[in-house]
Amino acid sequence: MSAPPFANEYALRMVAENDSKACNTCYKPTNTVLLSSNQKDFFYVCEQHLKDETFATAIQPEEYKELIKEKAKLTGDLAQWKYDMDKIKPYAWTKLVSNLSLSKEKDGKENEEYKELSIKIMANNERLNQLNEQIKNYKFKQYKLDKDIYKIRINNFIQMQVNKKRQQKIHSTNYFPSVPQNKIV
């Protein structure tokens, strides 16, 4: 089998609203175009299809991977801080016990540490919400088609090339026989 005419890497492009055409899949008007990396193939597609894993998957750039890593680290840190906070959480019964047997200094330090952790958690919860929003609204620019969709695109491209050659052959002067030039007797 020969090498495919183009790689399975498509860049997302937008066209003007007046240049929009029908989606290649559902035939609704769209201004979103997928263009192959060597620019031999392109087709119009709805943004909804790009979210469908069975149609195409986004190629994740480093910037997106960094957001995911930061979210995972922050989630782990928050879980640890909540665990630490639960260990030193001031309960009413511990205050009674501390009044009877423990010193006031230890109780004050625990309350300060509890307040610091709660402030830290609140601030980082805001950051986590921002990260989640950034990840949710991230606009991917590169896509890889599903293997079956990619095969269809290759077959369409090859069929177009065959049709183009056939049209050129038909328009050449040697394709059809010429009218006889001899006189009939």
Image: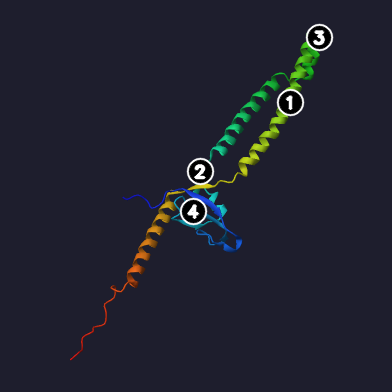
| Residue 99 image point, x, y percent | 82, 11
- Label 2 sits on a secondary structure element that is loop
Assign a secondary structure to mark 1.
helix
Viewer-side label of 2, 3? 2
Colour mapping used in the image? rainbow
The residues tagged by marks 1 and 3 sit, at their Cα atoms, a distance apart of 27 Å
| Residue occupied by mark 1 | 118
Depth check, front residue: 40 or 60: 40
Crowding at mark 2 (Cα within 10 Å: few <14, some 14-19, many 20+): some
Where does label 3 land, which residue?
A: 100
Q: Quadrant of residue 181?
A: bottom left
Residue drawn at 39 percent across, 62 percent down: 160
Q: Earlier in the sequence, mark 1 or mark 2?
A: 2
Q: Position of residue 12 (x, y in %)?
A: 53, 51
Labelled disc at residue 59: 2
C-alpha distance separating marks 2 and 3: 62 Å
**Which is in the foreground here, disc 4 or disc 3?**
4
Tag in front: 1 or 4: 4
Q: Residue at x 55, y 36 (%)?
A: 65
Mark 3 residue crowding within 10 angstroms, few (<14) / some (14–19) / many (20+): few
- Of labels 4 and 2, earlier in sequence is 4
Q: Give the number of the mark in front: 1 or 3.
A: 1
Between 77 and 32, the one nearer to me in the picture: 32
Which residue position is annotated with label 4? 35
* Mark 4–mark 2 CB contact (< 8 Å): no
Say whether residue 53 is visible: no
